[in-house]
Every structure is written in structure tokens, then in C-alpha cells.
Image (cartoon, grey):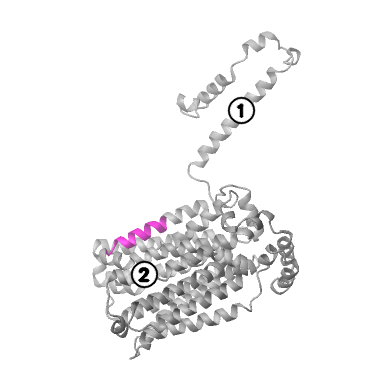
């Protein structure tokens, strides 16, 4: 915006990245401890506190005068608050939602995030026409007002019943459930299931931040962190204006208009996701959406690499695929990632693990935001190939490693992960061969144990034709196993594999 440059001066791609990313590192720091804060003061008060801090930071940025340092300082403070409420909001919505509505409740959060993104583009588009410093201050002012509203309103929300149970406040939890849960047979069964899960003594004595790395929870924590990082490695959507300028839309008005349309596509994708997240399931949407996002990015990269993007028709192909990328992301990874990483955790570690995974999301976001402008300036196609490659790799991993959680209560999901160290959604390519090998080895051990037992029996019990002579004729169990494996062709005659 011209009056922003008049206030702070112009700067290059690196400084641009630093200013954008300055809100993210503080968000990472508070995101790591958000779970502990939420476990201590409750989910709703952690959201309220984070929103209040965010409002202070945005207010400082709105009042910055001829000092880029003051603007960045405001963003740093805002980031401290952002890490708190982003790290806890998903956990809170997950814990107060009936299993049949949990996806839709997380959708509501993402719907307002998408609405904020969309309206943010359009607010900037509209304020760019103001001929005073409100041209760039107005977006900060609106953000401050909204944050104050959330900070005040959050204090009047009900506590999470699962948080109350963890703090041994059963009577309070039942009163909250009276407001949140219906009276159908299924609702009452879910209520009894939740109330039957007592607070874990081990979890109460041990910090949740440590407990999330215990053997029975470690895999879920790594899975949640992994998909949160992959979500941000899927691209640079917050630089939509830069993407459209690179594609050939000229002038500030055209680029802002392009950003505004992207916001609308994000909003539409989020709404469509809400209609299907509890119908198709988390894994299906994550895998399908990842394939669409990755394909769109690779197509755009190919257009730039081949030079086709620089023709008149090629330019519009790139623009269409940018919008397809934005729509596909919002309709899949934008919602499912945060929902899934929160609901796979047990109650005692949910806040800590969910906030930690959001913190890693923000850390990855920081790296992408910091390097984005310079990366785009250095190469037109490399960013799309890089982020497209990450997305396709993440989609393949999710196909095998993300068990479906749709339709299950949080307690059932907990038991599902407890029963298996690494529950698979689909057999790994090498798992069938390894399973056959394990089965053969188990059969061999059973036969060897059976022969060993028969050798300990009295000679009269060996068999009707048995006797001392039979024992001498009995084949060595190891040799018998080798012979059977050769005959079966299990190892294609490889003696070293048979011996192993």
C-alpha cells in the first residue's frame, strides 16, 4: 500500500518475509506451553488470555508511527497470544463435542478462520482506496476489536467436561453435560462412557508435556505433529497476492482482487468440508484433498518450468490452478489436520499434544513465510515443485498411517491406539511378506517346542511304534525346518535367508 511505504519505507523480499514471519516464532513458543496453561487454568480461560494478549499486540501495530521496529514488536506480542488460543481452541471444541458432531464443531472453527482470511483480503482491498493512514491501520484496528470480543466472550463459555473430570470435579462435569449432551440412547451411552473414564493418577502426577512422549502415546504425538507440519509444507497460500502478481495480474487492485477471490474459494472449500467430514471420514478427505493439492502445485510448477505460463492462455491456466489449490486445501487439510491431531490423544495429554503440534505447525509456517518471497523471486517453478512434492509424500504416508476415527468416541479412539503400537490404515507394501515370514517362524517354533515336549515323555508314551530306536531316527528340528523351507520355496533356495 502506498501510504504504508510512505510511513515505513520500502524494503526487499527478505525484510518482507521477516515482517510477515515475526508473528510466528512467538506463537511457537507459547504454543508449546499452551497445553500446560490450558490444563492449569482451563481451556476457556487459556483461549481468553491468548485473545487478550493478541489484542494488545495488534493494537500496538495499529498505532505504529514511522518505526518498523514498533510494528514488528506489536506482531511479536500478538504472536504470543496467537500461540495460546490456536493451541487450545481445537482441543476445547473436540472435548465439548458429541462424537457425531465433532467434525462439524471443528468445522465451525475453521469456517471462521476461512471467513477471517476471506474478509481480510477484502478489507485490505477496500482500505487500499482510503487516502489516509487508515489505509493500512484499519485492518489492524478491526483485528484488535475482534480479539477483544473473543477475549471477553470466551470467559462465559462452559468448561470442558473432560477437563473438569481430570481435576476430579465430577459434579461440575455432569452439570456441563446436562447442557451439552442430548437425551437420546446414543447420547446417554456416550455420556456414561466418558464419565466412566476416571482421571489417570499417573497423568496427574506427571506433566502432560512429558506424558505425551510415553510409550503408549508417543506414536500419536508424532503422527499429529507430522500432519501439522505437512499442512504448512503444502504451500504459501498467505502470499496469494504475490502468486497472482507472478502469474501476470498487474497493478495493486488486480492483485488484491485476486487475493479476495482466493479468500472466497477458501471459504467455499471449508463449507463443503463441513458437509462431508463426518460422512466420508478424516482419512478419506485428507488423502483425497492431498492428492488434489499436490497435483495442482505440480501442474503450476510444470507450467512455469516449460514456459507455458508466460503465454496469455497459460497465465489463466496458472490462475485457475492457484484457485483450485486454495479450494482443495480448504476443503481437506485446512480442517481435518487440526481435528485429527486433537482427537487421537487421550484426555490427559490432549491439550499438551494438540498445542505442541500446533506449535510445530507454526514453526513450519514461520520457515515457509520467512523464505517464501525470496524463494518465489529466485525461481518461478521450484517452490511449486518443492511444496507439491511434500504434499504428495504426506498423502502417501497418510494413506498407510492414518486410521479412520470418524464415528468413534474419544475414549474408543484412545483404546484403538492403545491396542496397537502403530495402528495402520492400510497394510504397508512389505507387510504381507513380513507377516508371512513371521507366521512361518512361529509355526517353526511351535513344531520345535512340540518335538522338545515329546522328547521329555517316557519311552512308553512315544507311540505305539515308538521306542528307543524311533528317537534315534527322529530328524533334527533345525534340519527339518530347513528342508521344509526349501520344499516350499519360501526363500527361493537362499540358504543365508533360511539360516537367518
Real-space Cα separation, disc 1 to disc 2, in angstroms:
58 Å
**Type of secondary structure dominating the magenta stretch:** helix
Quickly name the residue at label 1.
445
Name the front one of labels 1 and 2: 1
In the rendered view, tell whether residue 143 sits above or below residue 194: below
Q: How many marks?
A: 2
Secondary structure of residue under mark 1: helix
Which picture quadrant has residue 395?
bottom left
Residue 190 covered by magenta stretch: no
Q: Position of residue 228 (x, y in %)?
A: 48, 61
For the point 62% across and 55% down, the residue is 206
User: For the residue carrying disc 2, how many other residues have a C-alpha within 10 Å: few (<14), some (14-19), or many (20+)?
Assistant: many
Q: Is residue 243 left or right of residue 496?
A: left
| Viewer-side residue, 215 vs 276 | 215
Q: Is residue 144 left or right of residue 241?
A: right
Judge whether residue 166 can be spotted in this image: yes
Q: Is residue 6 left or right of residue 420?
A: left
Quickly name the residue at label 2.
322
The range drawn in magenta is 379-392
In the rendered view, tell whether residue 483 sits above or below residue 359: above
Q: Position of residue 53 (x, y in %)?
A: 50, 76
Q: Are marks 1 and 2 in contact (CB under 8 Å)?
A: no
Amino acid at each position: 500500500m502506498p501510504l504504508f511505504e510512505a510511513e515505513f519505507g520500502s524494503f526487499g523480499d527478505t525484510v518482507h518475509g521477516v515482517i510477515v514471519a515475526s508473528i510466528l516464532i512467538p506463537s511457537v513458543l507459547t504454543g508449546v506451553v499452551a497445553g500446560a496453561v490450558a490444563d492449569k487454568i482451563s481451556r476457556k480461560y487459556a483461549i481468553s488470555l491468548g485473545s487478550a494478549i493478541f489484542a494488545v499486540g495488534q493494537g500496538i501495530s495499529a498505532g505504529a508511527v514511522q518505526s518498523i521496529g514498533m510494528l514488528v514488536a506489536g506482531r511479536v506480542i500478538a504472536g504470543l497470544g496467537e500461540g495460546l488460543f490456536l493451541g487450545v481452541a481445537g482441543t476445547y471444541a473436540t472435548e465439548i463435542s458429541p462424537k457425531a458432531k465433532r467434525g462439524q464443531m471443528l468445522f465451525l472453527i475453521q469456517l471462521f478462520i476461512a471467513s477471517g482470511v476471506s474478509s481480510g483480503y477484502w478489507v485490505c482491498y477496500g482500505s487500499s482506496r482510503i487516502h489516509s493512514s487508515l489505509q493500512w491501520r484499519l485492518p489492524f484496528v478491526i483485528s484488535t476489536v475482534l480479539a477483544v470480543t473473543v477475549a471477553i466472550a470466551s470467559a462465559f463459555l462452559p468448561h470442558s467436561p473432560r477437563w473438569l473430570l481430570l481435576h476430579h470435579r465430577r459434579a461440575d462435569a455432569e452439570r456441563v453435560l446436562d447442557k451439552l449432551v442430548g437425551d437420546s440412547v446414543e447420547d446417554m451411552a456416550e455420556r456414561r462412557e466418558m464419565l466412566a473414564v476416571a482421571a489417570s493418577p499417573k497423568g496427574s502426577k506427571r506433566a502432560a508435556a512429558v506424558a505425551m512422549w510415553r510409550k503408549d502415546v508417543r506414536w500419536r504425538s508424532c503422527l499429529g505433529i507430522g500432519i501439522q507440519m505437512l499442512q504448512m509444507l503444502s504451500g504459501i497460500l498467505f502470499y496469494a497476492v504475490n502468486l497472482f502478481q507472478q502469474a501476470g495480474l498487474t497493478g495493486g487492485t488486480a492483485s488484491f482482487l485476486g487475493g479476495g477471490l482466493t479468500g472466497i474459494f477458501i471459504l467455499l472449500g471449508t463449507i463443503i468440508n463441513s458437509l462431508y467430514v463426518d460422512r466420508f471420514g478424516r482419512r478419506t478427505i485428507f488423502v483425497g484433498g492431498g492428492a488434489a493439492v499436490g497435483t495442482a502445485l505440480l501442474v503450476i510448477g510444470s507450467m512455469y518450468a516449460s514456459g507455458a505460463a508466460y503465454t496469455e492462455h497459460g497465465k489463466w491456466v496458472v490462475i485457475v490452478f492457484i484457485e483450485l489449490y486454495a479450494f482443495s486445501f480448504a476443503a481437506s487439510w485446512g480442517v481435518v489436520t487440526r481435528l485429527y491431531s486433537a482427537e487421537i490423544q487421550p484426555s490427559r495429554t490432549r491439550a499438551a499434544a494438540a498445542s505442541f503440534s500446533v506449535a510445530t505447525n507454526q514453526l513450519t509456517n514461520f520457515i515457509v513465510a520467512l523464505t517464501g518471497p525470496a524463494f518465489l523471486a529466485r525461481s518461478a517453478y521450484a517452490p511449486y515443485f518443492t511444496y507439491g512434492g511434500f504434499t504428495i509424500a504426506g498423502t502417501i504416508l497418510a494413506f498407510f498411517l492414518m486410521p479412520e476415527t470418524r464415528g468413534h468416541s474419544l475414549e474408543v479412539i484412545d483404546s484403538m491406539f492403545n491396542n496397537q503400537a502403530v495402528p495402520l490404515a492400510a497394510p504397508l507394501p512389505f507387510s504381507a511378506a513380513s507377516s508371512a515370514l513371521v507366521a512361518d517362524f512361529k509355526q517353526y517354533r511351535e513344531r520345535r517346542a512340540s518335538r522338545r515336549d515329546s522328547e521329555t515323555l517316557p519311552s512308553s508314551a512315544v507311540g505305539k511304534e515308538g521306542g528307543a530306536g524311533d528317537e534315534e531316527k527322529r530328524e533334527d528340528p533345525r534340519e527339518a525346518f530347513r528342508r521344509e523351507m526349501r520344499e516350499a520355496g519360501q526363500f527361493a533356495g537362499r540358504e543365508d535367508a533360511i539360516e537367518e
